[in-house]
Amino acid sequence: MNNPTVNVSDFTTFPGPRYKKLGSCSGEEFRDNILIPSIQKYGRDLIVNLDGVMGYGSSFLEETFGGAIRSGIDPSVVLKVAENVICNDEPELKKEILSYVKDQMEKLKSE
Amino acid sequence: MSNFFWIGWLIAIVTFWAGHYINAKVRKQERIRALIELYMQKTQELEDDALGYWVNMDEKIYIFQLNIKIKRLSTISKRLTKENKSLGHPVDEYIWFKKAISLDCPDDIRPLDISSDRAKRIMTYSHKLQTYFEDRI
């Protein structure tokens, strides 16, 4: 059975800045409108497909995945989703995203 | 037919295949060298553009253009890996370079000083990426 998949390319081909107030197609917008509702629906089975866009700024990725933890999503679920991202266009993205998720998990522990 | 006839043929065939093999190897090395030079050139261009964006407030450079150029480096590295797996890609340096360029970039913190931490990181990781491949030419 195929896992439920969210394609960022359906959201935008030009991922924008971190916050909505800084511009369109932001990480915050993607997280709040697409990622979190999808995680709430499908849980850790969710696959995020990052392929098919023109490139990601680090702020977009941090706000999307690190921000999901800050928004109250179970860190272990976000970690699993981050481990399962599809990023054939730019394979380095997975390690970068995992660094944001793990940083946020560390921050939660130390709070 | 004499043995000399068959030996002659054997030598011709072996010579042909050896020439073909050496030629293919040389062509592959040339492709790798061209890709490495392209990677280094694109890294330097990205460093210049990123410093233009952050330090010089160059209004012709937008952050999304920098993101596209970062992705271009990943594409070149994939082509390099396809040519020669052992070349690899310095993923950590790539990620730190990318973070230095595009992590937290609201307009109001520009222009930065050339001696700022971000500008130094952009230059440092650009240098590390270029050196990694320079050593492999």
Image (cartoon, coloured by chain):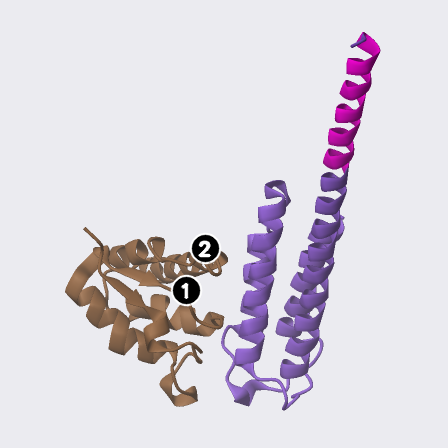
Chain colours: A brown, B purple
- Quick check: A43 above or below B17? below
Q: Amino acid at mark 2?
A: Lys
User: Whole-percent x and y of residue B63?
Assistant: 55, 80
* Of the image marks 1 and 2, the number of the one nearer the N terminus: 1
Q: Amino acid at mark 1?
A: Asp
> In the picture, which quadrant includes the C terminus of chain A?
bottom left
Residue ID for mark 2:
A95
Subunit bearing disc 1: A
Please give the range of residues in magenta: B3-22
User: Whole-percent x and y of residue A30?
Assistant: 32, 76
Other-residue count near label 2 (Cα within 10 Å), few / some / many at <14 / 14–19 / ≥20? some
Q: Are marks 1 and 2 on the same chain?
A: yes
Question: Is A101 displayed left or right of A35 in the figure?
Answer: right
Residue sitting at 38 percent across and 78 percent down?
A: A12
For numbered disc 1, what is the local secondary structure?
loop
Q: Is B109 covered by the magenta stretch?
A: no
Label disc, if present, on residue A51 of the rendered structure: 1
Question: Is A31 displayed left or right of A93 in the figure?
Answer: left
Q: Is B17 covered by the magenta stretch?
A: yes
- Measured in 3D between alpha carbons, the distance from the residue under mark 1 to the one under mark 2, in whole angstroms, is 15 Å
- Quick check: B26 above or below B61? above
